[in-house]
Image (spheres, rainbow, N blue to C red):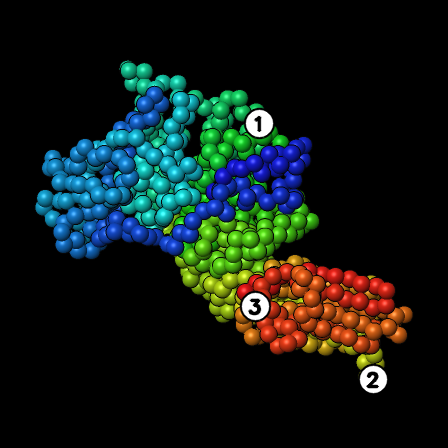
Amino acid sequence: MNRKFTILLSLILLLCWKQPFLFAQGLISVSSLEKPVRSASPAIPGNRPDDRAGRGINILKYSVYLEPSFLTKSLYGKCTLTFEITDAIPDSTVRLNLVNLKVDSVTSGDRSWAFFQKDSLLFLQSPTGFQIGDTVSVTIVYQGYPTNDSFGGYFATKRIIYTVGEGLYTQPPSMTRRWIPSVDRPDAKALLKMTVRVPSGNIVGSNGLLVKVIHNSDQTDAFVWQEDFPIAPYLMSIGISKFARFNQVYVNASGDTLPIQNFVYPEDSLKAVEDFKNLPDMIRFFSQKFGPYPFKKYGMLEAPMGGAMEHQTLTTLSSFLITGDRRYEGIIAHELGHQWWGDCVTLADWGDIWLNEGFATYSDALYTEHAYGEKAFRAKMDGFAALYFREDDTVGRFPIYDPQKMWGATVYEKGAWVLHMLRGVVGDSVFFEIMRSYRSSFEYGNATIADFQQAAESVSGEDLDWFFHEWLFEAGYPIYQFRWQAKPANPGGTEVVLNIRQIQTKAPLFRMPIQFGFDFEDTTFIKTIHVNQDEQNFHFTFNGAPSRVVFDPNQFVLKKLYNLSTLYPPEEFRLLQSYPNPFYAGESSQKIIIVFWTRSKYSQYYVQLKIYNSLGQIERILVDGKIPPGYHERTWRAWSDEGRPVPAGVYFCVLTQGNETQTRKIVVVR
C-alpha cells in the first residue's frame, strides 16, 4: 500500500515530468507513494486489542449482499457467515468485528439469535449452543453509514464508492469491519461471494471472478463476484462507478490464459492503457521467479485514494498514479507482487508485516532488474538504502519485526534489502528456490517470519538464524571502516592487507560474508570474507599489486562505508567528518572516531587537533606536536581535558598544520 499525499508530491511531479522511467531507474522510490503517510502512522504491535473476535470458530465462507447509496452514502447489507466450531464456547456467544453499523437481525435457518453490540464487537448468541465440529450458517442484516480513517475503510462520493482494506491510523489496521461483520484478522481467511446491487449504468469491481450480472426491473443491476480461493478480510474490496473497462491477457508457457480486468475513469482510460501495458510481462516474470500466478484473475481499479492497496485479484490504485507515461510503474509492480506476498501467502500477524511489504518492495526492484538492467536495479536499491538511512536518522531506529512504524522505510526499503542480502548469502538459484518453496508451502494460508526462515534453511541447507536475528529482530545496520595496503611479500609477490572495522553504535555487531574485488590490469579476483568482529585483518598474496580493492563490488550488503584507502592521497591535508555524528554519549565503550591526513611538506610544523565548544573554549586537545605525514586516527569520548563529560551540544573539531586549517562540526547528545 502507499503513503498519503503531501505537498511533496508537487515536487515529485516536477521531477518526474517527461521522465517515464525515473522510478524504474531508482532515482525516486515508489515506496514513498504506496502508503503515503507511512512516516506518520502509529505503532501496530500485532493483532490486538480485539482478538476476542472469532474465538472458537473458523470462518469458512462469507456470502455478502450489499445495497450502497451514492445519494445518502448509507449501506444496507446482509452477510451470511458459514463457520466451523473449533473450540468450546461456554456461553454459546460468537464474537465478530463490526464498527459503526447497526444490526437489525441475526438468524440461522428459521431461528432468530439474540445479539448485542458493544464498542467494535458484535455478539451473537445461539439459542441451542454449539458442539465442537459443528458447521453453522448465520445471516446478519445490518445498515448504517460506514466510516473510514481517511486512508482505509469505506468511501462514498457522488461518483464512486470504494473500499480500502488497510487503515493507517487504526490499530489493528484491518478495515473490513467498517462495512462487513467479520473476523477481521489476517489469519482468518475464508471464501467469498460478493453481490452488490447498484443503479444501472454503474459497474462493480470486486475480488475473484464475475459470475453474473442480474438486470432488475427497477433500473438496478446486481453484480455477483466470487473468490474461490481463501481471502483475508482486509483484502476484500468493492469499487463502484461508471467505469471504462479494458481487458488485457496473460498467456503462460502452456497456453493457458489469465484475464486482466481494469476499471478506470473514462477520461483516464488512454493513460491507463499505457501505464498498465507491462502487466502481462510482470506476471510472466514473477511467475517464473515465484511460481505460477496464484489466482484466476488480476486487475486494477482506479479510485481517488491516497496511494494503492493490494486487494486480492484487484488492486485499487490512486487516480494520481495514472499518468500515461509509466512513471509510477514501480508501484504497479509492487502491488502485483503482493498477489504472491500478502494475498496468496498472507502474514499471520501484523508484527510479520515484512512478509508483505518488504517482499513486494523487492518484487518491484526485481522487475526493474529484469526490464531495465543491472544499472537501473542498483540505482533503485541505492535509493531504497538512502530512504532507510533517512528514516533511521529522523524517525528512529527499531527492528523490522513488530515494527514501531508499520508503513515506513524500515519495513519497506530495509525489508527489500534484507531479501537482497539473503540472495547474496545463498546465491541466485537457491534464493529463488527458497521463494518458490515458501510460496508452495504456505499458499492460500498464513505464515510467520519463522516459517520463512524455516523454508530458507530447508532449501539452502544452512543454519540462517544468525542472519534473521541480526537483520529482522535487531535494529540498525553495519558501518564499516576499510583500509588496504600492498607491500612486498617474502619470498616474492605482493602481500595485500585488509583492515576492516565495524564502528556502528546502537546496533549489533554484524556477521556477514562480504565480497572483495581485487582489480589488476587485465582481471579482477573476487574473494569472500566473513566479517564478524569489531576489527579484523586479512592477508592475501598475489603475483603483483592490485590497482584497487573494492569493498562489496556487487553491492549485496546494506551498509555505510568509510574507505580510508582511496578517499585522499597521502599528500592531502584533510579532516574527515567524525563518526558517529550525532554522537549519543552514555556507554563507556562508545567513542567518536576522527580521521585526518597531514602533508609531508609541512612536516616541520606542529599538528594541532583540538575540540572547541560553541563559546570557542578548548574542551580537548587530541594532538599538539609533530607527527608523521599521512593517515591518522584519534578518538574522543566526549570528555574534557579536565576529565569531565562535556554537556550535550555542538562542538567543533579543528585541525591545523602550518597555515592550513579545517573544521568539522560534532553534535553530542546525552
Nearest to viewer (mark 1 / mark 3): 3
In the foreground, 205 or 568: 568
Q: Amino acid at mark 2?
A: Pro
Q: Is residue 369 left or right of residue 257?
A: right
Total residue callouts: 3
Q: Whole-percent x and y of residue 400?
A: 48, 57
On screen, residue 241 versus residue 24, left or right, reads left
Q: Residue at x 28, y 34 (%)?
A: 64
Report how far apart the C-alphas of labels 1 and 3 lie in the structure: 54 Å
Q: Residues within 10 Å of mark 1 (few under 14, many from 20)?
A: some
Residue 564 position by quadrant: bottom right
Q: Position of residue 133 (x, y in %)?
A: 18, 52
Mark 2 or mark 3: name the one nearer the start of the chain: 2
* Residue wearing tag 1: 271
Which quadrant of the structure image shows residue 637? bottom right
Q: Nearer the viewer, residue 600 or 202?
A: 600
Residue displayed at 53% across by 48% down: 361
Q: Compare marks 1 and 3 and give the one earlier in the sequence.
A: 1
SS for callout 2: loop
> In this image, 363 relative to 564: left or right?
left
Q: Which mark is residue 491?
A: 2
Task: Tell me the distance, in whole angstroms, between the alpha carbons under discs 2 and 1.
Answer: 70 Å
Where does the image place residue 386, in percent across and percent down from the top left?
A: 62, 52
On the image, the x and y values in percent for residue 95 come to 22, 47
Which residue position holds label 3?
Answer: 585
Q: In the rendered image of this protein, does residue 385 appear above or below residue 525?
A: above
Crowding near the residue tagged with mark 2, few <14, some 14–19, many ≥20 C-alpha atoms within 10 Å: few
**Amino acid carrying mark 1 in the image:** Lys
Between 297 and 516, the one lying in front of the other is 516
Looking at the image, residue 245 lies above or below residue 131:
above
Q: Which mark is residue 541?
A: none
